[in-house]
Image (spheres, rainbow, N blue to C red):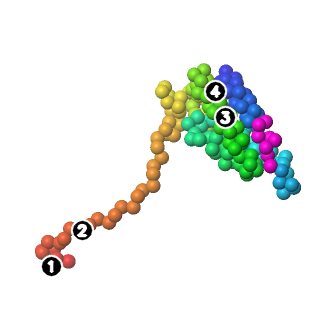
Amino acid sequence: MQRAIDSRISARIGQYSRVLYQELRDLVEDDRGLVATSARRRWVRQAVDEALHRLIQEPRAQRPERLLLREVRHCFAMSQLPRVVLAINETVSAAIAFLDMPECQELLRGRCRAMTRNGDQCRRPPVTGEDYCPSHRHLLEPRPTRLQPVAPLERAPLAPAERAVA
């Protein structure tokens, strides 16, 4: 049952991915032999697909459209970047709106958000009110920050009796 739910969401995100790639495909710059246009198009297609599917795994990611633009902007001429930015922003916003729909959220909530060593999503149910199962609950805790150097302690002036001993 869960595989069917995941495949429906993944298929819909795949549709957003295809639409965005179709908008960007013809804007890819031709480098006149330095790097084949087909190789650049493959790069763009793969980056778009990975970025949009990443939205399912990392729903709280900050500025996913910006990350995608960083990955693909070298494939486009400077004159085309405004169109590229607009297409990416509109498509990513639409995909996020789809994933934020209550029906979609209920489908996604049925599993732990952690990833296994194989790269698959954990299949265990999450603890009530949280996003992770008991095995992955440690992922909720903030990671320890680096320790800041501590200033040396000031020594109190020695009493007259201690000065004689020192």
Dots 2 and 1: beta carbons under 8 Å? no
**Tag nearer the camera, 4 or 3:** 3
Give how far across and how far down residue 160 sits, in percent. 12, 75
Earlier in the chain: of badge 2 and badge 1, it is 2
Q: Residue furthest front?
A: 79
Mark 4 element type: helix
3D distance between C-alphas at marks 4 and 1: 79 Å
The three-letter code of the residue at mark 3 reads Glu
Identified at 67% across, 48% down, the residue is: 70
**Tag nearer the camera, 2 or 1:** 2
**Tag nearer the camera, 2 or 3:** 3
The answer to whether residue 138 shows anywhere in this view is yes
Give the crowd class for mark 1: few <14, some 14-19, many >=20 residues within 10 Å. few
Give how far across and how far down residue 143 sits, in percent. 48, 46
Give the crowd class for mark 2: few <14, some 14-19, many >=20 residues within 10 Å. few
Q: What residue sits right under mark 1 in the picture?
A: 164
Earlier in the chain: of badge 2 and badge 3, it is 3
3D distance between C-alphas at marks 2 and 1: 17 Å
